[in-house]
Image (cartoon, helix red, strand yellow):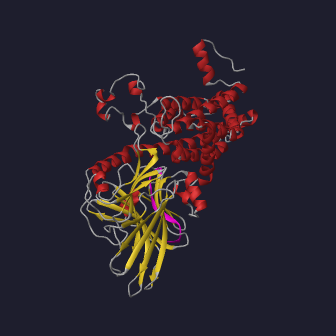
Amino acid sequence: MPDQNNRNTIIFVVCAFLILMIYQFAVIEPANKKRAEAARQQAPAGATLAKPGAPLAAPVVTREAAVAAAPRVPIATPSVKGSLSLRGARIDDLFLTQYREKLDSPAPVELLRPEGTRYAQFTEIGWTGANVPGLPNANTVWTLASGSTLAPGQPVTLTYTNGQGLTFTRVISVDDKFMFTVTDTVANRGPVPITLAPYGSVQRQGVPATLGRNSVVHEGGIGWLKERRNLKYGKWQKDGSSPSYASTGGWIGMTDHYWLTAMIPAQNEQIEGQYRLTKVGSTNLLDANFIGQPRTIAPGTQVSATTRVFAGAKAAPVLESYQDKLGVAHLDEAIDWGMLWFLTRPIHTFLSFIHGHVGNMGVAILLLTVVVRLVFFPLANKQYESMTKMKKVQPAMEELRKKFKDDPQKQQQELLALYQREKVNPLAGCLPIFLQIPVFFALFKVLTVSLDMRHAPFIGYIRDLSAPDPTTVFNLFGLIPWDPGTMPMIGSLFAYGTPPGFLHIGALPILYGITTWLTTAMNPPAPDPIQQRIFQLMPLIFTFIMAQFAIGLLVYYTWSNILTALQQYVIMRRFKVDNPIDQLIGKITGKSKAVG
């Protein structure tokens, strides 16, 4: 029958989702924890030689020791601070001053760290050529020819002479955001021509276990080489080096959730880009690199190549400005807009517009939810009217099912006749649901990738909309100074007093569960007792599932549930159908509230 088919479809989708989530928590999460523990016990191996552009493994030293081991040029801009190493002429010491590493710490986000440290990440630019001796490499110490601090409007010039007829000059400048511009010049003072090609790479020596686990946002190799080229950290380390991608211009690099480090060649340069894996002992050395076209330098002449380095936050307006002003192809594709990009992009733009006017990301989410509900109001009205009519005729349907339980064909004929008399279409509620599903996923994506969510406060105890609800029911949301880890039997499940993800039920997840139950209770009951039990358990199950997501998502879904319940309530009152809100009011007041 139509109504049963509709419910069976919904049940199938819900069960499939639940199976995936159970697999995630029961299989994938334990495996990730084992890998994380193994990663913590690993240490990079000793040094090895590599071809130009490939990473070198080095002994593990402290960050301070690595920075002090080479002469440096300070970097100071309104957005970043750090230093440029004269050994290798690398950008390898960089902090993002406008973003904090942790909510309760003033320490800025660390983006790049020198080779030799644990999980080193840095950039390298240079020249490569076959049988050309004396090319500068990672150990070459450059001379600071001019400038003292790399800052906006204050470039620095580095020089190196290899003693074999080649002089290298490197001019590095930086803007007030996250873009470095490196112009390399090679002068041939020797007696024979040489052929060199420019290259650039972003290198990472070992990947922290916390990276690459996000199934919603891409983390790993990323670039635009004729098209978007992604390689997740996990797949990269498992499958090894990628093929080479030919492109004219474009860019290539590595990304985490909110941060990007990318090499940007001249946009008219013919390049070959690649994600490379080099294994040194138990350490995976990752390298996102490009090689440009060879240049033949005759004696007494020189050639130049300009490469830009983006090292900073994936703020959409900043990426779009570089894309427009510098002509960097598709740089805003560094943000993982997903398959529904045609929805996520405008929704993100509109959310940012609201945020810019109200100044509070939580309030912006509430207002965005209202706008989305208004857009879908006509469709939702038809959906809720259909469901309300179905609930109104439910008693009559149950009577027909009992009366003709031994004659399914007659039962279906009588039900169809009932639908016609009451002008009920059991399938009328399906189309609005299917039309809203893409927007549902697009909003989920937007609230996950948005940099504005990170460390964004809302009200009260909600200080970071990008993090899960910090409260927990096990200590009455912080009211009781008690360590849940001391609980008999299950105390061993807690680490440092914090319950594991599937038990971390805070205040907002509970409110989300209540509002989800309310909207579910307003729907017509399923004809089958097993189906009824599944729908009754869904709010509880989804409460545990959603509790682990960012609280900003819960703000959206809870507020959306409240608006949905209000819209359903008005319609049910109009059609004089009993509803859980009136029933609850009746129990509280001791009176039965009429629906007329």
Of the pair 318 and 32, the residue shown nearer to us:
318
324 in the magenta segment: no
The stretch in magenta equals 246-258
Q: Is residue 382 visible?
A: yes
Q: Residue furthest bottom?
A: 191
The secondary structure that dominates the magenta segment is: strand
Of the pair 590 and 560, the residue shown nearer to us:
560
Rendering coords of residue 41 (x, y %): 25, 50
Of the pair 288 and 265, the residue shown nearer to us:
265
Rendering coords of residue 484 (x, y %): 33, 28
State the quadrant of the N terminus: top right
Relative height, residue 359 to residue 269 (above, below)? above
Of the pair 570 and 138, the residue shown nearer to us:
138
Rendering coords of residue 34 (x, y %): 30, 48
Using residue 93 as the reference point, say whether residue 348 is left or right of it.
right
252 in the magenta segment: yes
Q: For residue 125, what is the image quadrant?
A: bottom left
Q: Residue at x 26, y 67 (%)?
A: 48
Relative height, residue 42 to residue 182 (above, below)? above
